[in-house]
Image (cartoon, rainbow, N blue to C red):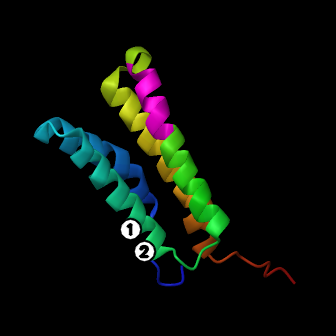
Amino acid sequence: MTGHLPVWPVAALALPAGFAVAQASGVRPLGGAVMLALLGACAWWRWGASRVALLAVGGVAVASFVASHLLHDALGVAGAVGLAGVVTGCAAFVLLDRAEVPRRTSTAH
């Protein structure tokens, strides 16, 4: 790694944390604000990354958010929110964090 902390755990927890805040407070916009703040932190930490990658992770997060609402009957609320978090975290890892991992070069002679 180049000294950067990975952002995938924060991205993965954005939707579950926002959901938890919305449930605990009864204020859905507050939960949305928490989710956006955590995703914004990911973008800020990786501001030097490709803008396409940042937008793609944001798009995956939005799609996961929508999908969690559509899947809650089939998977239950916890399952739908958890799946959305996993998908968003995986997208952040692949598109933002993996680029930070140095590639091995062959040492065979």
Name the residue that disc number 1 marks: 41
Residue at the spot 36% in from the left edge and 55% down from the top edge: 36
Residue 45 picture quarter: bottom left
Q: Residue at x 34, y 51 (%)?
A: 35
Q: Which residue is mark 2?
A: 5
The numbered dot on residue 61 is: none
Judge by depth and name the residue closer to the eye, 61 or 26. 26
Q: Secondary structure at mark 1?
A: helix
Magenta stretch, overall SS? helix
- Is mark 1 in CB contact (under 8 Å) with mark 2? no
Question: Is 109 situated left or right of 9 in this image?
Answer: right
Q: Secondary structure at mark 2?
A: loop
Residue farthest to the front, as pictured: 29
Quadrant for residue 37, please give it. bottom left
Residue 61 position in % (x across, y down): 49, 47
Residue at horizontal 42 percent and vertical 74 percent from the top? 5
Residue 106 placement (x, y as % from top left): 80, 78
Say what amino acid the circle numbered 1 marks: Ala
Magenta stretch: give its range. Answer: 64-72
Q: Which residue lies most toward the top here?
A: 73
Q: Amino acid at mark 2?
A: Leu
Q: Is residue 65 magenta?
A: yes
Is residue 107 a member of the stretch shown in magenta?
A: no
The answer, for residue 15, to whether it is visible in the render is yes
Q: In the image, 75: left or right of 109?
A: left
Q: Between residue 63 and residue 97, name the one nearer to us.
A: 63
Which quadrant, please, contains the N terminus?
A: bottom right
Q: Is residue 99 above or below residue 91?
A: below
Residue 90 higher or lower than 2, as above or below: above
Label 1 – label 2 distance at C-alpha: 12 Å
Can residue 6 be seen at all in this image of the molecule? Answer: no
